[in-house]
Amino acid sequence: MAEHALRLGKPALAMHFAGWHRVDSVTVAAGVQAVVNVLRSLEMLPGTPKPLQGVRCVPGRWWRNDAADLKAQRGGMLHLIKEPGEYVHAGDDVGIVRDVFGNVVQRLTAPADALVLGLRGRRNQLVASGDRAIALAFAETGGGPLPPATANRS
C-alpha cells in the first residue's frame, strides 16, 4: 500500500517487524514510537525523536515482494536455520522441510545476499506445497557487502 501511495505522490510509511504474522507488545511499542518519531521530525508533534527500544533498525534501503519469498515445494515440517534480522548470503540454507519420517525433502536457500524478514512460524511449523515459508529483503543497491552476519541457529 505504501508503494502505491508513493506513486500517487502521497507520503507513506511502511514498517516491517520480525515475527511475520505475529503481534507482540515490544514491536507494537516500537512501531508506535517510530510513527511518533516521524511526526516529531516533521514538526507535526512537539518534542524530539526518541530511540526505539527492543528492536534493531537495519541500515540502508531494502526491497521485497511476494515473488521473492522462499516457498515450500513439498509439504512437511519447516525447520528454521536463520532468524528474522539475520543476514544471509547467496546459497545459504535459511530453512529445511522434512517429511514425516524426518527426511529432508527441500532446502530453502537464499537466491542472493539478503536480510531475513520473517518466517512462517517459530519452530517446526507445518507447510504445504506452495506455501510461502520465508520472506527475504534485498539491498536496494543491488548487491554489495552485507554487514557481519549474526550467529547461525539450527
Image (spheres, rainbow, N blue to C red):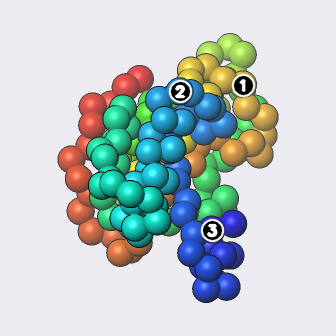
Residue at image x 66%, y 59%? 66
Inspect the image, locate mark 3, and give the three-letter code of the amino acid beneath it.
Ala
The residue wearing badge 2 is 25
Please tell me how crowded label 1 is: few (under 14), some (14-19), or many (20+) other residues with Cα within 10 Å.
some
Lower position in the chain sequence, tag 2 or tag 1:
2
- Secondary structure, mark 3, is helix
Q: Are marks 2 and 1 in contact (CB under 8 Å)?
A: no
Residue 150 image-quadrant placement: top left
Please tell me how crowded label 2 is: few (under 14), some (14-19), or many (20+) other residues with Cα within 10 Å.
few
The residue wearing badge 1 is 126
- Determine whether, in the image, residue 107 is placed left or right of residue 46: right
Looking at the picture, how far across and down is residue 107, in whole percent?
A: 55, 38
- Secondary structure, mark 2, is helix
> Disc 3 and disc 1: Cα gap in Å?
31 Å
For the N terminus, give its image quadrant: bottom right
Q: Nearer the viewer, residue 85 or 134?
A: 85
- Determine whether, in the image, residue 21 is placed left or right of residue 46: right
Disc number at residue 2?
3
* Residue found farthest to the front: 46
Inspect the image, locate mark 2, and give the three-letter code of the amino acid beneath it.
Ser
Q: Are marks 2 and 3 in contact (CB under 8 Å)?
A: no
- Identify whether 146 is placed above or below 33: below
Residue at image x 68%, y 76%? 4
Judge whether residue 26 can be spotted in this image.
yes
> Disc 2 and disc 1: Cα gap in Å?
26 Å
- Determine whether, in the image, residue 144 is placed left or right of residue 128: left
Looking at the picture, how far across and down is residue 109, in whole percent?
A: 49, 46
Inspect the image, locate mark 1, and give the three-letter code of the amino acid beneath it.
Leu
- Secondary structure, mark 1, is strand
Please tell me how crowded label 3 is: few (under 14), some (14-19), or many (20+) other residues with Cα within 10 Å.
few
